[in-house]
Amino acid sequence: MELSDAALSQIANCLRSSECRVRLLSFELTSLASVSPAGLLRFVRDVTPADIVFRMLRGCTREHFGPELCRFIVSRRFFSVSHLVDAQSNDVPLSLDDAILNELSSSTFQIAAPNSITVDGLRSFVKVCVCAVPARREDVFSGF
């Protein structure tokens, strides 16, 4: 099935009508060429998966992975984003910057796509993570 706004809307309606909860939503090895950025955002918000994966997608645009979708992605329990390309096979960056990184609530994640996270933003994020998780004695001395 080719992905389109209409196809995604039908899938979302089916899931809603069956009161199905989605744990993992995975878009892999397909194309977003016929899906509008608004249609993709509406679909993921309607389905509200606990975990989300975008991997090896063709036909992507910057607008598909704009700030609103990135905020949604980083609010999932688990997410993975990698290998997003446009119609000419050029990498498509995420609109993921330091501010959105600071909103991250995922416990497990992978970001393997160009983004706008700076070195300072990454340092700040790591510092928050380290401070939020107190060191256990066995972690500190595990090398001995």
Image (cartoon, rainbow, N blue to C red):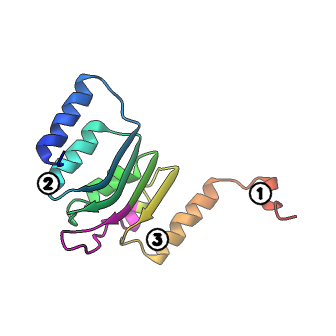
Residue that mark 3 sits on: 121
Gap between marks 1 and 3 measured at Cα = 26 Å
Whole-percent x and y of residue 110? 47, 59
Quadrant containing the N terminus is top left
Disc 1 to disc 2: CB gap under 8 Å: no
Q: What's the residue type where badge 3 is placed?
A: Gly
Write down the quadrant of residue 96 in the picture.
Answer: bottom left
Whether the residues at callouts 2 and 3 have beta carbons within 8 Å, the answer is no
Q: Secondary structure at mark 2?
A: loop
116 sits to left or right of 32: right
Which residue does the image show at 22% across and 35% down from the upper left? 12
Residue 91 coordinates in the image, percent (x, y): 29, 73
Residue located farthest toward the top when viewing the structure as drawn: 18
How far apart are the two marked residues, 2 and 3, measured between alpha carbons? 30 Å
Between marks 1 and 2, how big is the CA–CA gap?
A: 47 Å
Quarter-wise, where is residue 9 in the image? top left
Kindly identify the residue that appears in the image at 35 percent across and 47 percent down.
26
Q: Which residue appears at 13% of the width and 46% of the height?
A: 5
Q: Magenta region, mostly helix, strand or loop?
A: loop
Q: Nearer the viewer, residue 124 or 88?
A: 88
- The answer to whether residue 98 is magenta is yes
For label 2, the residue is 36
Please, is residue 87 above or below residue 134 in the view?
below
Residue that numbered label 1 is attached to = 139
Amino acid type shown at disc 2: Ser
- Residue density around tag 3, few if under 14, some if 14–19, many if 20 or more, within 10 Å: some
Secondary structure of residue under mark 1: helix
In this view of the protein, which residue sits in the foreground, 41 or 67?
41
